[in-house]
Every structure is written in structure tokens, then in C-alpha cells.
Image (cartoon, rainbow, N blue to C red):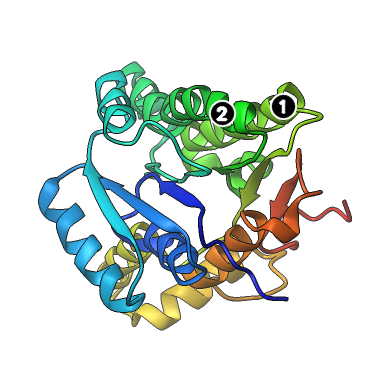
Amino acid sequence: MQIDLRGRSAIISGSTAGIGFAIATGLARAGASVTLTGRTQARVDEAVASLRDKAPGSEVQGVAADLGTREGCDTLIRAVPDTDILINNVGIFAPQDFFDTDDDTWEQFFQVNVMSAVRLSRHYARGMKERDWGRIQFLSSESALNIPSEMVHYGMTKSAVQSVSRGLAKVLSGTRVTVNAILPGPTRSKGVLEMLKQNAEKQGRSLEEVEADFVKQARPTSILQRLASPEEVANMIVYAASEQASATTGAALRVEGGIVDTMA
């Protein structure tokens, strides 16, 4: 199977590093013209230059905007009014005791993780529907179903994103616009690695030891028994964005099937 996205445009929110940057790289290598987004111009410029090195000859641009705000979403929409592929990847996470998580933190997580995707999808889905072709993906998580007790606020946002994805797929039923949620398990993203590094320093252990213990203790049903790489997550997303995935819509696509221990 040859995935060819030449002639297609893609926006990946939160794509200056980690999973988002891996997605942008995969889509660019498949031929799509790619728009990266990040909160600061410096980070965006650095990511654009890096992507051009990784995918020579690709069409790449960047937009600096805080997508956790209405104004930031409007900035992106003004800069790039239309797209064929929208990957709602931007998100934040942080472990925090339920009783110490205040209203402002709940609101921040909701605005960044959920409303950014709602605002962008609401705008870009209109054009996709009119052109009768498009791909919208929401980066959910196994935490949408296996809510982590150490960050209930994060799990809530991922459950909400999955609900929006399913509902929007129904809104666009009968069109050639597909909508799917992607559920990575534990991934070697920048945020996860920073958390594990902090734990390793506190415990006086190596990062490799702490990483292995994290999977065994926090995600014992993992079939991989390791953290997935951002590139492995991106591979699923690039396929779901392809012409070949035309019948895959309204789905929750798991990158690893062991974290939530069900057969379906």
C-alpha cells in the first residue's frame, strides 16, 4: 500500500515537538502540504526548519497561536482558512491530586484539550463537507476509558474529545469526510519523558528502569510492555488520513489494544 497525500493540505495542532511533530513529519513525507502550530514563533520556526530537513521538498508553514483560547483559534483560521486534513493534537497533561485540582485547572484543561478541537473542527469541517472530502482526527487517549486516578481532570477531557469525535462523525455521515479518535497508550512523548526523568532523579534510578516500572505498575495490561514511540502513533494517524482509509469513520482507533482490557 502506497500512501500518497500529494495535493492534500494538513493542519496539525500542537506540532512543534513529540507526537504532533511526528505526525507532521509522516504527513509531509506522504506528500501533504503541512501547517505546524505552536504557542511561540521561535518554537514554530525551529520546528518548520527541522521538518524541512526531515522531509526535503515538502511544503511546510507554521502559525504561532495559543489554541487554548478562542483568539488563538481565530488566529490560525485567519492564517489558514481551509484544510483537507485536521489533526486535533494539542493538549496538556499533569498528574495532580483530585482534591488539590482547583476550578482554574479544570477550566484550563477543558479549554486546551477539548475546546481547541471543537473550535477548529467546527470551522474546518464546513469546507470539508462542501468539498465532500476531508479527514478529522482527535487525539484522545486510553485515559478516556481507563481514567487515571492521579489525573482525573485529564481523563475527563479525553473522554469528552472522544464523544465529540463520535458525534461529529454522525453529523458528517453520508459524506466523504471521515472523523476518528486516536487512542495512544503510554507514549515516549516529551511530556511523559519529562515526568519520568523527574521521578528517576527523585528515586536515584535510571530513566530506563523507571520507564519499565511505569509500564508494569501503572499499565499492567499493556501488551507491548513498553512505551510506544511518537512515530508509531503517527503511523496510525497517517493511515487514517489517507485515501485508503475512506471507510474508517466514527471509530476509536487504539495504537495499543492492551491498556483497556476489552476485546472490542
Q: Which residue position is annotated with label 2?
A: 125
Q: Evaluate whether residue 223 shows in this view.
A: yes
> Residue 39 at what x, y percent from top left?
21, 42
> Residue 20 at what x, y percent from top left?
41, 56
- Secondary structure state at the residue bearing disc 1: loop
Q: Is 232 rendered above or below residue 24?
A: below
Quarter holding the N terminus is bottom right
Towards the viewer: 144 or 202: 144
Q: Which residue position is annotated with label 1?
A: 172
- Secondary structure state at the residue bearing disc 2: helix
First reached walking from the N terminus: tag 1 or tag 2: 2
Q: Pointer 1 and pointer 2: residues touching (CB < 8 Å)?
A: yes
Residue located at (63% from left, 28% from top): 129
Q: Badge 1: few (under 14), some or many (20 or more) residues near its Cα, within 10 Å?
A: some
Q: Is 233 rendered above or below residue 161?
A: below
Identify residue type, mark 1.
Answer: Leu
Identify residue type, mark 2.
Answer: Ala
Decide if residue 10 is on the left or right side of residue 254.
left
Towards the viewer: 193 or 43: 43
Q: Evaluate whether residue 229 shows in this view.
A: no
Report which quarter residue 190 is drawn in.
Answer: bottom left
Q: Badge 2: few (under 14), some or many (20 or more) residues near its Cα, within 10 Å?
A: many
